Image (cartoon, helix red, strand yellow):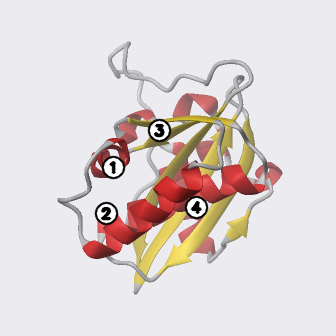
Amino acid sequence: MKEELLSSGSTRPSLEYWLPPPEGWLKINSDACSREGGSVGAVLARDDTGNIVLAKSAFFHFEDPLVAESAAFLEGIRLAVDNGLNHVLFEVDCEAVALALKGAMEDVSWEAHSLLLDCRNLLRQITSWEIEWIPRVIKTGPHNLAIWCRNRRTSGLIQTACLPFSICNPELA
């Protein structure tokens, strides 16, 4: 399956765009895309000016989209905890992940449930956090990073200076 890099168009409604976090906070966006035999999760952390301060990707053996999105979100939490981030706004484009973390998880598979419980437990290590669902068209950066990493077979922490414009552009956050 071929996926194209997403870019923002100038025809988006004025209220549908990515906003940077408040000063002193970081915004961590995660996403997943499919690959042969599994998926790729990608995470971008941006500061209040929209600049990428951390980037990470991971390969998963999960083919189920909800499980892959949950695993990508868990990688985002790990990135925050591992770097001592205490004020984090998380954004996901998978509404089921956001809803499960805000409330009940009865409607998710056991694989996703297990990952989301890990997310809840790890979030306890972050002083202040919020999670929000936003449509992918508003935050194409993590999706583009996942595709970029899949195509280059790259995983782990990524030097932000190596990232292409389709990922770094704050307007495509």
Closer to us: 100 or 162: 100
Query: Which mark sits nearer the N-terminus, 3 or 4?
Result: 4
Point out residue 82 in the picture as x, y percentages from the top left corner.
75, 57
Residue of label 4? 75
The quarter of the rendered structure image containing the C terminus is top right
Residue shown at 35%/41% (left/top)? 102
Q: Nearer the viewer, mark 3 or mark 2?
A: 2
Relative horizontal placement of residue 94, taking residue 157 as reference (left or right): left
How many circles with numbers are drawn on the protein?
Answer: 4
Q: What's the CA distance linking mark 4 and mark 1?
A: 15 Å
Dots 3, 4 in contact, CB < 8 A: no
Question: Where residue 66 is drawn, which disc sits there?
Answer: 2
Q: What's the CA distance linking mark 3 and mark 1?
A: 12 Å
Query: Which mark sits nearer the N-terminus, 3 or 2?
Result: 2
Residue of label 3? 139
Question: Where residue 43 is drawn, which disc sits there?
Answer: none
Residue shown at 67%/60% (left/top)? 56
Residue shown at 74%/63% (left/top)? 157
> Hey, what amino acid is under mark 1?
Cys
Q: Nearer the viewer, mark 3 or mark 4?
A: 4
The secondary structure type at the circle numbered 2 is helix
Q: Is residue 43 above or below residue 169?
A: below
Point out residue 81 in the picture as x, y percentages from the top left corner.
70, 53
Label 1 CA crowd tier, 10 Å (few <14, some 14–19, many 20+) = many
Query: Which mark sits nearer the N-terminus, 3 or 1?
Result: 1
Q: What's the CA distance linking mark 2 and mark 4?
A: 14 Å
